Amino acid sequence: MFMKKFLFALMAIAAAMTVSCSKPADKNDDSKEPEGPKFRIATLAYTDNWWSEATTLSVETAEWWDTWYFTYDAQGRVIDVDRKQEDHPERHWVFNYDGSTVTVSQKSDNKVIMTLTLNDKGVCTALKDEWDETAVFEYDATLRNTKITKEGELRSELSWRDNCLVSWTKAKENNRLRTFTYANTPNKGDLHAIYSEAVDPPARWMYETGLFGHGPAYLPKTSVWDDDKENGSTITCAVDENGYCISETKTFPVDNGKTPTEIFKITWEEIK
């Protein structure tokens, strides 16, 4: 009898260890979903030196020529995105919520530019653009995008490991494969620092509204196309005192004495 109890105890311990090891990383010790971020994105600014004469570029020296300003309602939903871009007319969008439907309209003339259908988790499963073309989004159990089709045609398949996007295919370019690695820094603000470019819209700023599920659990480190490994990019993310990413600097291999660079700068507002 003692031996049976001893063996049963060992089996129980082994089972507990299996559960603990396999428990999703985004759940706490009480198996409850973790609290959301204490801060949310306020602005997203972009710059690069692809077409400028600058041989190097940094967050400190950059001139930000493209910035999005996010506004939220009392429920924490994005309701307004104001884009100010150098040498371009102002673009300002308003989000209206009606049950599972979200319409995104131009503020200047109320023209609807896209309509989103949300599931019961508040995540976009279908997007109809202003040309009446519809993209469909599929997700895994952690609400991370795994597949995108548009007008019934496959556009992108996305693979995740440990809640981090490790690759996606771009069907419009013969299933070209892009792969990623990550730093050990948690992505506290749930940024979509890595996202699928297979469907436009949505572009990066739309992903940051939170309507397209979660981003990677950690901040990215490298990004490379499988057929162009020599030109992969290195991504350096700086975080503030609260652990939130405030800049993403993506650098490419030196070319004729120039280091091509792309930078996103992020500011955050506290959720009251």
Image (spheres, rainbow, N blue to C red):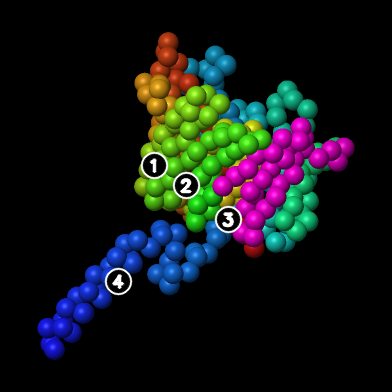
Q: Position of residue 5 (x, y in %)?
A: 18, 84
Q: Few, some or many C-alpha atoms within 10 Å of disc 2 (few <14, some 14-19, many ≥20)?
A: many
Residue at numbered disc 2: 216
Q: Position of residue 243 (x, y in %)?
A: 47, 52
Task: Name the secondary structure under disc 3.
Answer: strand
Task: Name the secondary structure under disc 1.
Answer: strand
Q: Residue 17, can we see it?
A: yes
- Seen in the picture, residue 17 relative to 42 is either above or below; the reply is below
Q: Main secondary structure of the magenta part?
A: strand
Disc 4 vs disc 1: Cβ atoms closer than 8 Å? Answer: no
Q: Residue at x 45, y 16 (%)?
A: 258
Q: Few, some or many C-alpha atoms within 10 Å of disc 3 (few <14, some 14-19, many ≥20)?
A: some
Residue at numbered disc 1: 182
Look at the image and give the residue range highlighted in magenta. Answer: 109-138
Name the residue at the top extreme.
Answer: 256
From the viewer's perspective, is the residue at label 4 or at label 1 nearer?
4
Residue at numbered disc 3: 39
Q: Position of residue 227 (x, y in %)?
A: 40, 22
Mark closer to the chain start, 3 or 4:
4
Disc 2 vs disc 1: Cβ atoms closer than 8 Å? Answer: yes
Q: Few, some or many C-alpha atoms within 10 Å of disc 1 (few <14, some 14-19, many ≥20)?
A: some
Numbered mark located on residue 75 in the image: none
